[in-house]
Amino acid sequence: MRTGTADYFDSLIQSLACADIERSRINIVVDDQFIEGVFLDIDYFGFKILSHRKISDVIEPNQVRIYFLANNEYHSYCYESLSRVRKLQEGRVISVIHEPSCFMLLNNICSEERYSFNDNDLIEFCAAQFGSKALSFINARRKDILPFDVEYVMHCQHLALTRSDEIWTHSDFSALKLQFETETTSTAKFTVSEHPHLASVRGRDQQNLPPDLAKPDGGFRVGMFGWVSPSKRVDVALRAFAAALQTVPHEVGSCAEFLVVGKLPPPEHFDPVGLASSLGISHRVRFLDYVPLDQFEALIESCDLLLNLRFPSCGETSGTLERAIAAGVPTVTTAYQGFAELPTSAQVSSFWPREQVQLFRLLCQSLRGTAGLQPATRSKSRPRIADLIANAL
């Protein structure tokens, strides 16, 4: 099981390992609740991995502590540590925002009183955005007066805003949201940085794929990769694909395949397999669960078009997108939040039905060979995150 932040971590550490930095100056701190003990106190690319339970709450003079904040359970310990940290003179705190809206995670751990947090803390976190109305927003969401989607716009970033000397984001959207949607006074300096880059996977031998996963000669493969959920817009993409197959000539559509690679949720929650069957395209859609990483990358490279869509959930870290860029695969993203700033091959609206119509047109053009999409590229105008870390030490 891998997340986008896991790919991010590996790429960042490899970049730092290639930089001119003394290994002893960097420790990697993890939550050993999720990491087997055998991985602790070892060198990873020359850097020591430590349990967060061994880290002092006090930042010594000239020390820098960098917190990577995301909206998933594996980052809970970062919020707990950030809430306790105390700086001595010249000590510094930097927060790296993977996802600006983290109400979902913090609501869970506060309501369950985990990681030393409780509901009083949640009120303080939400007050950073909603001021005196924070408790009203929390209660309205918990009682379903406000819809679930509102969780994707509640940032709860009080700790980052009040305890950080610097805040690094990967989009203008995230930086502006935290600066403009706030009732909290923050003196943190904001920097918008580039994602760490994955090494190129181009030229990966497709013959390493099992015969049943290899793309047939002359075939056209559309791919969606990663955790399968409604926010990845798999259902919208399948409907657009079905409509495209009914529109293009039979000899074109008969060569098309839609590949969905990632863990499927319980069908009672979200059932793209059943949807493909009801649309009559089961013979053109393949659902794969987790596959080994080398096959995962080879399958990405085998695609003629990759769809990496998000709404209403939209973080700033996508391992799939980074792998698509590394593989040189044309990639379509959603023009929404931070994703709207990505230099990808094409973008579609986050508003339905415009989203589905635009996907339909792109798929028809791609199947006919008239889309003219170029491979996704990386921005060169923003500083690299590894360089920022090196300069901060």
Image: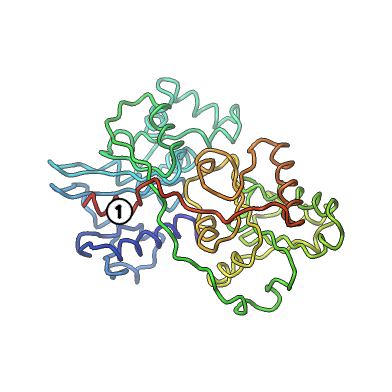
Q: How many marks?
A: 1
Looking at the image, residue 161 lies above or below residue 68: above
Q: Secondary structure at mark 1?
A: helix
From the top left corner, tell me how far across and down residue 271 is, in percent.
Answer: 72, 52
Which residue sits at x=52%, y=58%?
325
Q: How is the image coloured?
A: rainbow
Q: Is residue 94 above or below residue 367?
A: above
Looking at the image, which is closer to me, 133 or 341? 341
Q: Nearer the viewer, residue 111 or 204?
A: 204
The amino acid beneath tag 1 is Asp
User: Can you identify the residue that label 1 sits on?
Assistant: 387
At 81% from the left and 64% from the top, the residue drawn is: 283
Give the percent coordinates (x, y) of residue 207.
Answer: 62, 79
Picture coordinates of residue 133, whole percent (x, y): 45, 21
In this rendering, would 31 be left or right of 155? left
Drawn side of residue 110 relative to residue 203, left or right: left
**Front residue (pair 87, 170):** 170
Residue 196 in percent (x, y) is at: 40, 56
Task: Quadrant for residue 54, please give it.
Answer: bottom left
- Local crowd at mark 1 within 10 Å, few (<14), some, or many (≥20)? some
Q: Which residue is painted at 41% across and 20% down in the image?
A: 132
Above or below residue 318? Residue 94 is above
